[in-house]
Image (tube, coloured by chain):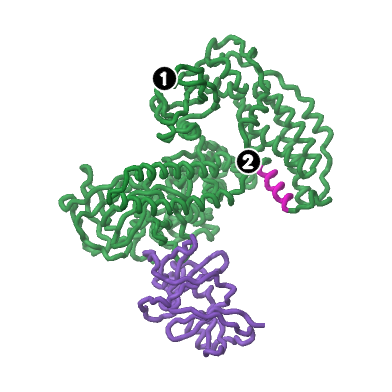
Chain colours: A purple, B green
Amino acid sequence: MSVLHVLFRVGEADYVVPAADVLQMESFDGATAVPGCAAHVAGVVQIRGRVIPVIDLRLRFGLPPIARTLDSRVIVVSSGNRQVGLLADSARQVLRIEADAFEPPPAVVREQSRGFVNSIARATSGVVMRIDFDKVIGQQSVLEEQGHGQQA
Amino acid sequence: MKDLLGAAEFMDGYLAEAEEHLSAARSSLLAIDEALKKRQRSPAALRNLFRSVHTIKGLSAMVGAEPIVDIAHEMETLLRSADQLGGNLPLPAVDAIVKGLRAIEERITSLSRGETIPPAPRELLDALGSIQIEAFTQRQLGTLSLAPDLLAKLSIGEREQLQQGLAKGRRALRVDFVPSQARAAEGFSITRVRERLASLAEVVKVIPFTLPASAAATGKVAFALLILTDAEDAAIAEAAGAGPEELHPVELLGAGQSADEDAAPEEPPFAEERGDRNFVRVEVGRLDDALERLAALVVTRSRLERACSSLIVAGGSRELATIIAEQRRQLRDLRAAIMRARMVSVSEVLARAPLLVRGLTRSSNKLVRLSIDAGQSELDKSVADRLFPAVVHLLRNAVDHAIEPAAERRRKGKPEEGQLRVSCSERSSSQLTLEVCDDGRGINRESVAKRAGLPIPQDDAELLALVVRPGLSTLDEATHLSGRGLGMDIVKRIVVDQLGGRLQLWTAPDQGTRFTLTVPLSVTVLEAFSFMCSERTFVIPVSAVEALAEIEPQSVTEAPNPGARASAVRLFKHRGASVPLFALGSLLGLAPEARPNSKAILLRRESELFAFEVDRMLGQQEIVVRPLTDPLVTVEGVTGSTDLGDGRPTLMLDPLLLMHRAEQPEAHRV
């Protein structure tokens, strides 16, 4: 059984999310920064009347920031009753990937990515990483997450 | 049981509604019972009770629950005659109605479990049917000084409401309102007048009548508003947009003697009641939808206004400005109309509280007297729905932890019965203040501090900050020692984070604890100032702002700042007082900019004034606020987001909360 995935690029790597979890894709022309929230939160944008937070995947994945281009895309994913935008360098393709093509990432990759990558697959274009966007967007508030980080 | 009408959804709707009316009926009955103890009658509660029972009967008939219909019918008959005879419900009747409600409740429960409903108990129906209500003659109150045609339009209950109000020393007024084009242009419609008066007075009845044809006008329709009030004539006249000649005091004539009031044609009160109150039940979702569309319209309008103002500057017609101004008013009225439809009375929202407290006291073996004074206050349905759980938490804490067992209270020389009071008042046209107050042991600072592992708080505000820490709520033992704590983080989250309101605390050992919740009446549309700060645009609700001022270099004094705090406080001279001045940009962590001609936004916290420096003010407009609910962007001090017409979110700030964030000792800051 093959599943539709949205393919997007952050830095030099390709990532996918299941298309079923993607509500829409929008071009990005800036977000309203929210003072005091985590650095990887680019801010809020208004998409079809809803105000949603946008996570800058470059910063989330530990890459240096770059100037946004016309290729920049906000991929709006839904998780439970939350809607969050993921800001990618580009996102153009929808891929069909066989469900059994995915395999768990090597332990070191999982470790290094803090669980952001939950499986990898080989597509025609090369290796793609499927992200666990619940981990990427975080289940708890930024403050709590940072708080725990400090204690650890 | 057969599937009634073959629709399970319909049944769900029935059960939910029936429960709602049952609980309304119970609280009306409680009110009547309370009044009876004081040898007073409560015509308004009686009518509410009748309405609830009547609705239950109608609903039950629709789902074919005949036994419930039978019981409700007998109760309704009894209540109708009680109302017609002056609102007197004697104790045996109250008892019978209590039994009746219980019987209905049992049958609704059976229905919800899909069981067969037991038939209506014969003895109950007989008991309800056999109660004779005597006409209540309280003619010693005297007759109302009203024209006979107006008097005839009042039900006995309404007359009593006026008579009793007068007897208690309130003033009764007849305020006439004659609609006209000129008044409509000023924004005075009968609904608006009624609404404005309701904030100053108890509006007993609005009676339309025809003005006698005169040279000036031909038989126009006018309204007589009958109100009870403690307010000054001038205030009433202003609220009603009326001249002094349109205010007529209503008095009691011939007090002490039996007037010929009975001679006035007796209208069946309930028939009129039904005509008067044409209710439609609307799913809140549909109103939300209408508001959502209106919100879009408000945004388009501000774009239109911007486009027009540049046209007008370029020499466009003055008519454009008039049209825009008129449209602004119309939109505001439309918004007000929809918002009104969404308002629920706070008394109704709190109607379940007495039963809740009764249940809590029974399980805790404490004596608690709950008094609720919600006045005429109303709240938006969505605010009310979110606020109620917070109130429940506070009541539960008060009963479980704050109010001492009777023996302990006796030892302390307090009355055995603990006092728990919920009161509420409209703080302004956009905010409501709700207080939950007990006379219990108070919150123990030391034990809260110990539990939290932090220094002992110096004042109530610091204590509150500790009490609402999420960790504290899970420590069960602490809640007993400290007298408070359970679920307080939830209360804070609801009041501050979700509703954008404020939570305050006062507590004193063995004297009690008071929580003050200040919340917006509605969370959707409000009037706001927009301003620039560090190159960004923000908005702040007009209702929150005490004053705006220019910052002149000579009116600012630097204060010593040995710790080199980023958000350094200066002193700002404002109307002879020295006010702490914060640079809003540095509170926001943005690059602070020293720029000439900056402005100060003055806000009040309790009795203290604070000033916040911003680059410049942009203007004032109506905005549609959307809460920022996602945990990624919930930040203290940022209370919501709006669209000023550019399709981008603009953040709404609460500078006092930002200041509060900055005030926290570094160690606590995250």
Residue A9 in the image: x percent, y percent?
47, 82
Give the quarter of the image for residue B642: bottom left
Circle 1 residues within 10 Å: few <14, some 14–19, many ≥20: few
B522 lies left or right of B272: left
Based on the picture, tell me whether residue B10 belongs to the magenta stretch.
yes
Residue B583 in the image: x percent, y percent?
27, 58
Residue B651: which disc?
none
- Image quadrant containing the C terminus of chain B: bottom left
Tags 2 and 1 on a common chain: yes
B243 lies left or right of A94: left
Residue B20, compared with residue B559, is above or below; it is above
For the stretch drawn in magenta, the main secondary structure is helix
Earlier residue among tags 2 and 1: 1
* Residue type indicated by callout 1: Glu
Tell me the CA gap for discs 2 and 1.
Answer: 37 Å
Chain to which the residue tagged by mark 2 belongs: B
Chain to which the residue tagged by mark 1 belongs: B
Residue B137, compared with residue B513, is above or below; it is above
Which residue is under mark 2? B280
Which residue is under mark 1? B245
Is residue B298 at all visible to an observer of this figure? yes
At 36% from the left edge and 42% from the top edge, which residue is drawn?
A: B322
What element does badge 1 sit on?
helix
At 43% from the left edge and 63% from the top edge, which residue is drawn?
A: B453
Q: Which residues are magenta?
A: B9-20
What element does badge 2 sit on?
loop
* Residue type indicated by callout 2: Val
Residue B445, compared with residue B96, is above or below; it is below
